[in-house]
Structure formats: C-alpha cells, structure tokens
C-alpha cells in the first residue's frame, strides 16, 4: 500500500509509526481483549492513557504546575465562544486580527451579549501577508487574544507579546508542539488536535488556574473550564480514541528529542521550500519574510489557470492536498511535525520540473 505526500492543512498527516502502533493494538489494547474504542472511559486502562497524555504534554511543553491541561471537544471553534464566556469579567476584551481564524474568533466574541470587543492590531490592510506589531495592552481589558500561527495565510508569531498587562490567550491550533513557546507567557493556549497532535475530535486547552478559579454564573456545564478541570476532562465521555492517539504522538515527539528537536527539523523543512520559492521565477511566497510560518506555506505562480494545472499534476504525482484555501487561492504546503523532509525535497524537485516545462529560464 503506497502512502502519498499529504500536504493537508487538517486533518493532517500522522507519523507512520504511530499509525502502525494503533493498527497493532486495535483489536486488543494492552492485553485487555478490547479495542481502545471499546474501553470504558472510567476504566483504569483509559485513566492511565489520559494521565500519560497529560504528563507527556506537560513535559514536552514545560507546562508549569499552576496550569490545568484539559482535553475537550468542539474544536478550536468552540473555544472562540468558551474563552469570552469564561474569562471576560469586565466586559472588555482585546483581539489581534491576523486572518480568517482570528476573524472567526472575533465574530464569536462579539456574539456575547454586552461584551465590547476591541481589535487592537490588524494586518487586514496588507491582506494578512504579515503579522502586525501588537501595541501595549492596558488592564482595561480582560485578556488579549492572538492567533500564533495563521493556517490559511501562512504567517506566524514565534513568541508571545511581552507588553500586555493582561493574560495573553493564544490559538495555537496549527503550530502547537511545532516550535517552542514559553507557556508561562500565556494565560490560555488552545488547539484543535487535527493539525499537529492527532485525530479530529479532540481540543487541547492549557489554562492558568487562577483564571478559572470560579465558574461564571449560569454557564452551561460543558462550557465551564472550572467544571471540566474539576472532573479531569471527564465530566462526560471524552473523545477516548483521539486522546489515545494524541498520547502516542506525544511519545513520538519525546523520542525524537522533544519540541526543540522537532522545531529544528521544521525549520530545515520550511527553509528548503522558502529558499526555493525565493529563487524561482515561476513560484513565489506572498508572505513577508519575517512573518513566515514554519507549518503552513502558501505559494503562487501569479496565474490562476497555472496554479490549477500545478495542483492537478502534483496530485497525479502523489503530492496531495496542495490546493490553497478557497479564500486565498494558489497553493499551500502544510508541513506539520509528521511531514517528512523527503517529501519537501521531492516537492521541490517536482516544482522545478514543472517550472522548466512552463518555460522557466
Ligand atoms: C483549524 C483551525 C481552527 C479551527 O479548528 P476546529 O478544530 O476545526 O474548530 C481554528 N484556528 C486555527 C488557527 C486553525 O488552524
């Protein structure tokens, strides 16, 4: 069975060794005679899995003890609502607009009755091809929300803003565990799992305990961080299979040497592609060099018909899911942790041949 090079932005490529372990254990997990999918979430088998997943993530991200790690459902998109519902006290919150996902987060916050949502920085004027500088955020706000990696536009903040007087909340859906961040710089970090962690259906939330010390009045139970934390992410049935696969992915990252080692690899992969794009007379990157993402790399030929032809031919050569997001067009190569460097090298060779055939000198 031949595997393709899968450049999907999410759900995305997983490590082959993880998939093989899932396969090997699928019918009987750890001698239980049951699949992980069939285990009770209250069994000691599953309790061990979720405990291991949490402690591995704590170790990989160096998460301080005063942070809770939650395994929730509803995707990153539900966090767009849960964050203001749980963390807005003074009814004023700050957002940075760096693209489609930030805009969705802003839209959901604006639906909270009585909440004033202020966009304190935006790169909309230059079509989100860079990330804006973030001005000092005063304590009139409850929090400052940023998107560390903009999956669709291919831009990234590689560290938290240092001039915020209020907790920084980060949507890290597309670059959690891809490069190092200092968790203590953030009040809350969240990520849908299907890009860099595991299967869809799991959302990871890392939140400073003092921010969720008290449940807000009339908050629906499932949307209450405090209640979820108190119940060890098992207020109801958690996405058990997704948590199990996430645990295997965390083990895989640890074996590779942790996030620092993975970041080094990711930098090599991205550097290869950006270097080629900057050199090519056919393909180019629309993103300003110092805002460029390591995990999502959009590129264009400048000719829509040619972009389409490229995507079609690439697909035939087993380079799949290279079509850019419908909102920006062109192409996008998502190079998450599990994407192999050989795939980047092979893609570049393919692009070179394509360019030659199109008459590139
Ligand atoms: C994919 C993505 C989302 C949406 O994730 P869901 O889990 O599908 O809700 C939100 N933010 C960013 C940055 C993303 O990449």
Image (cartoon, rainbow, N blue to C red):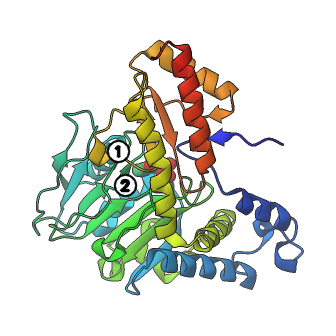
- Ligand 1 closer than 8 Å to the CB at disc 1? yes
Rendered residue at 43%/50% (across/down): 294
Quadrant for the N terminus in the image = top right
Q: Earlier in the sequence, mark 1 or mark 2?
A: 2
Q: Mark 1: few, some, or many residues within 10 Å (few <14, many ≥20)?
A: some
Horizontal side of residue 55 vs 328, given as left or right: right
Using the image as rendered, state which of residue 173 and residue 209 is in the foreground: 173
Q: Secondary structure at mark 1?
A: helix
The x, y position of residue 154, in whole percent, is 38, 42
**What residue is pinned by disc 1?**
104
Rendered residue at 49%/73% (across/down): 70
Quadrant for the C terminus in the image = top left
Residue 230 in view here: yes
The x, y position of residue 259, in whole percent, is 49, 69
Name the quadrant containing residue 349. Answer: top right
Residue 12 in view here: no
Using the image as rendered, state which of residue 214 and residue 152 is in the foreground: 152
- Ligand 1 closer than 8 Å to the CB at disc 2? yes
The x, y position of residue 309, in whole percent, is 56, 17
**What residue is pinned by disc 2?**
80
| 1 and 2 marks in contact (CB < 8 Å) | yes
Rendered residue at 56%/21% (across/down): 354
Instruction: Please determine whether, in this image, residue 286 is positioned above or below residue 144.
Output: above
The x, y position of residue 137, in whole percent, is 13, 63
Q: Secondary structure at mark 2?
A: helix
Instruction: Please determine whether, in this image, residue 58 is positioned above or below residue 4.
Output: below
Horizontal side of residue 81 vs 40, given as left or right: left
In space, the residues marked 1 and 2 are separated at their CA atoms by: 7 Å
């Amino acid at each position: 069975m031949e595997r393709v090079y899968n450049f999907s932005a999410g759900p995305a490529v997983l490590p082959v060794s993880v998939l093989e372990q899932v396969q090997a254990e699928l019918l009987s997990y750890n001698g239980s005679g049951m699949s992980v999918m069939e285990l009770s979430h209250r069994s000691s088998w599953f309790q061990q899995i979720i405990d291991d997943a949490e402690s591995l993530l704590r170790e990989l991200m160096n998460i301080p003890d005063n942070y809770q790690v939650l395994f929730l459902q509803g995707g990153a998109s539900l966090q767009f609502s849960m964050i203001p519902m749980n963390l807005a006290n003074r009814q004023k919150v700050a957002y940075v607009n760096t693209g489609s996902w930030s805009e969705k987060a802003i839209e959901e916050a604006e639906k909270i009755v009585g909440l004033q949502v202020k966009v304190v920085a935006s790169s909309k004027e230059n079509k989100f091809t860079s990330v804006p500088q973030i001005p000092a955020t005063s304590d009139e706000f409850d929090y400052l929300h940023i998107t560390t990696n903009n999956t669709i536009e291919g831009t990234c903040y590689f560290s938290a803003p240092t001039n915020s007087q209020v907790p920084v909340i980060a949507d890290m859906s597309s670059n959690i565990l891809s490069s190092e961040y200092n968790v203590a710089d953030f009040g809350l970090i969240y990520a849908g799992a299907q890009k860099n962690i595991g299967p869809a259906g799991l959302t990871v939330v890392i939140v400073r305990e003092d921010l969720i010390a008290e449940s807000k009045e009339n908050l629906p139970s499932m949307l209450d961080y405090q209640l979820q934390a108190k119940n060890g992410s098992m207020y109801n049935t958690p996405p058990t299979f997704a948590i199990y696969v996430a645990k295997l992915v965390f083990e895989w990252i640890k074996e590779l040497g942790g996030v620092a080692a993975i970041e080094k690899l990711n930098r090599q992969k991205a550097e290869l592609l950006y270097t080629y794009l900057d050199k090519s007379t056919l393909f180019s990157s629309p993103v300003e060099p110092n805002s460029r993402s390591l995990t999502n790399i959009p590129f264009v030929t400048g000719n829509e018909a040619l972009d389409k032809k490229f995507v079609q031919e690439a697909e035939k050569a087993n380079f799949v899911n290279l079509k850019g997001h419908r909102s920006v067009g062109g192409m996008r190569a998502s190079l998450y942790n599990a994407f192999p460097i050989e795939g980047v090298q092979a893609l570049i060779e393919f692009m070179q041949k394509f360019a030659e055939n199109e008459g590139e000198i």
